[in-house]
Image (cartoon, rainbow, N blue to C red):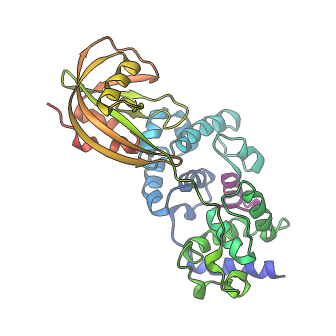
Amino acid sequence: MQDKLIREKLIGWYRINQRDLPWRRTFNPYAIWISEAMLQQTQVATVIPYFHRFLRQFPDIHTLAGADLESVLKAWEGMGYYARARNLHRAAIEIVEQYQGKIPSSFMQLKKLPGVGDYIAAAVASIAFQRPFPVVDGNVKRVLSRLFLIDTPVNDASAHKVFYQQALRFIDIHSKDHQGIFNQAIMELGALICRPRNADCLNCPVDSFCQAYQQNLIHHFPMRHKKRKPPEYQVSAAVLRKNGKILITRRKPEGHLGGLWEFPGGKVRKNETPEQACVREIKEEVNLDISVDSFLTTIKHAYTHFKIKMDIFNCTYVSGDLKLNGPVDYRWVSADELELFPFPGADRKFMHLITFS
């Protein structure tokens, strides 16, 4: 009975208080799938303009499947976590080839698509097709941990299974009504009311059921393991000029930052200066001898599991025939051509400082 009341109160609250977000104005599974892929690890305010631009450029599954990967990465540029874009592209091709361009409504079929895990499969199945699957993201874990005093750390390996079982309590498998709306309601509660800090408990529709609130333990939940401090690597990169153009190289399509273009360079080794690393890396990656002319800038950038401190140098081609060892492609580009290519966020931080003679 309590679970049913919580469910009803959350849905009632959501109908009145939900944010007007573009992906909530449709039941189109393609649009919902794109939004959920974007919303993973990215804030809503950041996603909204990307969502609109992406759908203008790739309005349906056939357009996305038929696009080249570089144009997809360019549309994604700035959101980070580029594996999401690569997986969207691969999944679109599979949907066109295996499902005649129709996004499957089955949770298990959705999970077989590249980049689609439990969360996205449940979100698309429940919101677009009203299938009875709970979604479990960070917001949901936080709400459930406080409601029921769940002491499993949310970043523990067992957390998803624990919180998924709790979320199942609110799914009515005998009804097709409100499956998607409940999932959105509990996520919205976590985003707007049951926030990580400064939870707005006085305006919570389920405060009377919340054990953490009743016992004044809101600040103790959710629990989490302390994260280790991520390592920081020193990196050098070259703005390498030849005949008025600059060299950029493309990373392998798979792996970290796969498919993106960058200014060539790499990690600084022990007992090596950044300038020496720059010269060595260019020789190893593209077989060119260069001279380091001047220091351009230093930037810092954080990724999920590590950080980098990158020194960038203005360099000039001296000799050698370009041969790729690591990168899969290269271009000598002019100033107005740089914007045509998708670059990592780290490179974007210093591109505005580059001048062309």
Q: Nearer the viewer, residue 67 or 7?
A: 7
Q: Which quarter shows the N terminus?
A: bottom right
Q: Nearer the viewer, residue 47 or 286?
A: 286
* Residue 269 image-quadrant placement: top left
Q: Which quarter shows the C terminus?
A: top left
> Looking at this rendering, what residue extends furthest in the left direction?
357
* Viewer can see residue 176: no
* Residue 356 image-quadrant placement: top left
In the image: residue 199, left or right of residue 108: left
Q: Nearer the viewer, residue 56 or 160?
A: 160
* Membership of 333 in magenta stretch: no
Give the residue drawn at x 55%, y 32%.
254
In the image: residue 244, left or right of residue 41: left
Q: With respect to residue 166, does 65 lie above or below?
A: above
Q: What's drawn in magenta, residue-wise?
A: 119-137
Give the residue drawn at x 57%, y 51%.
37
* Membership of 126 in magenta stretch: yes
Measured as percent of width and height from the top left, residue 46 is found at: 44, 59
In the image: residue 314, left or right of residue 22: left
